[in-house]
Amino acid sequence: MNLELHDIQGTVLNNRPMPYFGSYVAFRINEANAARAMLRRLIQNVSSAADWAAPKDNAWLNVAFTWEGLRRLGLSQEILQGFPIEFRQGMAARAAFLGDVGRSAPELWDFPHGNNGFHAGLLIMASTSEGRDDKLAIGHRALEGLKGVEVTARLDVGVPPTLREHFGFADGISRPFIEGQGGEPLPGQGTPTKAGEFILGYENELGELAKGPGPEALWRNGTYIAIRKIYQDVAAFRQYLQQCATDSAGQERVAAKMMGRWRSGCPLALSPDVDDPSIVADPKRNNDFAYFDDDRNGRKTPVGCHIRRVNPRDGLKDTMANARLHRLVRRGAAYGPTLAEGVTEDDGQDRGIVLGLINANPGRQFEFVQSQWVNDGDFQSQGRRTDPIVGRRDTSDDFAYPEKPVRRRLTRLPEFTATRGGEHVFLPGLGGLRWLAEMRDDNP
Ligand code: HEM
């Protein structure tokens, strides 16, 4: 079975380049005909997964809609009601369940998140700033003369000079290998994940055909992305590490235990006591590990650390959970200026990460991972403990892991992050985009 790469939007199967320059542009749709006209102009410029490897200008453009956006585009009620409830309600309405409370509450989200005019979005990624600007120009041209669609916000993302995300970790390393994507899995990617976990129109891990509502032409090769805009309090993170250890080696160890990888990206599973950048440099080694056989208790990679929560690999083998049903394709991009190395006072600047978590079933995948694995610890006998990097803190604020001679317990973890926006969006296939652009007002 091969995926229809020419019809799948490129970001679903391809990671951003490195270095990268990107923009996310949000649109408000006031009039269906204008939005359809914009879409007709854009479609020929939308990058498919087949284009990705050899784009003319190393720049890519993808298009997504919220449920409200599809409604304003004129999709019939019958079809609209067939979408998954998480997508229909939108992420702001799901805040209590997702742990977006306190300073992460939707009332405090950045405009236009939280039902304030995010109806369609352009996702632009490029390997140069010129490439990014060219794609932005295409977006502007698509809007020319159309009064019924307006840009509500634009957020630029770009790799910090360190080539790391703001807390200082290398990212973009681990991802599922999707059946039919072409090529061979890298060591550590394991048995290919059924394509229907990420793309509609294919069989999923339950042996069912992943489907959407309405005609197949609308949803085939489409997917959902859970977009999270997350502020990162880098000064708080650095201060906390300093409280935990007086020397930099000790601080690096605590940071690594929280993440499950050294900041270089080297997995603790393969080198638990010293960072080994040679492992990171080798794509055949940097993700080649599992947890069950030799690290069930988390002596190397703590069971409560970030990467072991969001992808427990084989670590839940003797429990009721089937980790294969909760996989996410992760796309991350940094926004805001870097906090200079060594600075531990906050400079008041806004910085963080925009995550795109790709899944075909937002309830079983993103929302499950966020609510049960990031924001609870019950699934691995960690009580109510939450993710030490990105977890909510109102229900638990400690993190414990095995150390010699006795386990280490970190208490009073501050909130290192705050959600500043969140949207469930639908990314149709290219055929789906055409269907939406051409649909009749009485679409069935
Ligand atoms: C400020 C917020 C976050 C930061 C800085 C962050 C950082 C990282 C880093 C450094 C890695 C390891 C590198 C890699 O494997 O590519 C990683 C992996 C990952 N993260 Fe996050 N992350 C954040 C939030 C989240 C959230 C909210 C989710 C999902 C709910 C998530 C899902 C994942 C997944 C699925 C992986 C791959 C794990 C694996 O396969 O081993 N992350 N993240």
Image: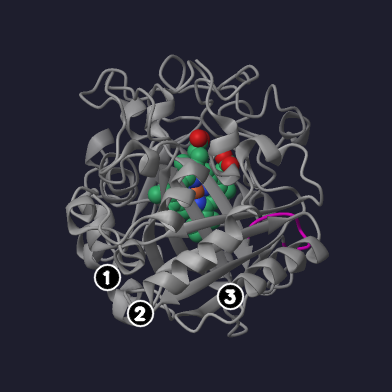
Sequence-wise, the earlier of marks 2 and 3 is 2
Q: Where does the image place residue 213, in percent across and percent down from the top left?
A: 25, 43
Q: Where does the image place residue 138, in percent across and percent down from the top left?
A: 68, 67
Q: Where does the image place residue 345, in percent across and percent down from the top left?
A: 61, 80
Residue 143 marker? 3
Indicate whether residue 52 is drawn in magenta: no
Tell me which secondary structure the magenta stretch mostly adopts.
Answer: loop
Q: Regarding mark 3 in the picture, which secondary structure is present there?
A: helix
Disc 3 from disc 1: Cα separation: 36 Å
Location of residue 208 with respect to 75 vertically, above or below: above
Image point 71% across, 27% down: which residue? 283
Q: Nearer the viewer, residue 385 or 71?
A: 71
Location of residue 192 with respect to 276 vertically, above or below: above
Disc 2 from disc 3: Cα separation: 20 Å
Q: Regarding mark 1 in the picture, which secondary structure is present there?
A: loop
Image point 66% across, 29% down: which residue? 286
Chain part drawn in magenta:
160-165
* Mark 3: amino acid: Leu
Label 1 sits on residue = 101
Q: Nearer the viewer, residue 204 or 302?
A: 204
Q: Nearer the viewer, residue 120 or 196?
A: 120
Label 2 sits on residue = 116
Q: Quadrant of residue 70?
A: bottom left
Disc 1 from disc 2: Cα separation: 18 Å
Sequence-wise, the earlier of marks 1 and 2 is 1
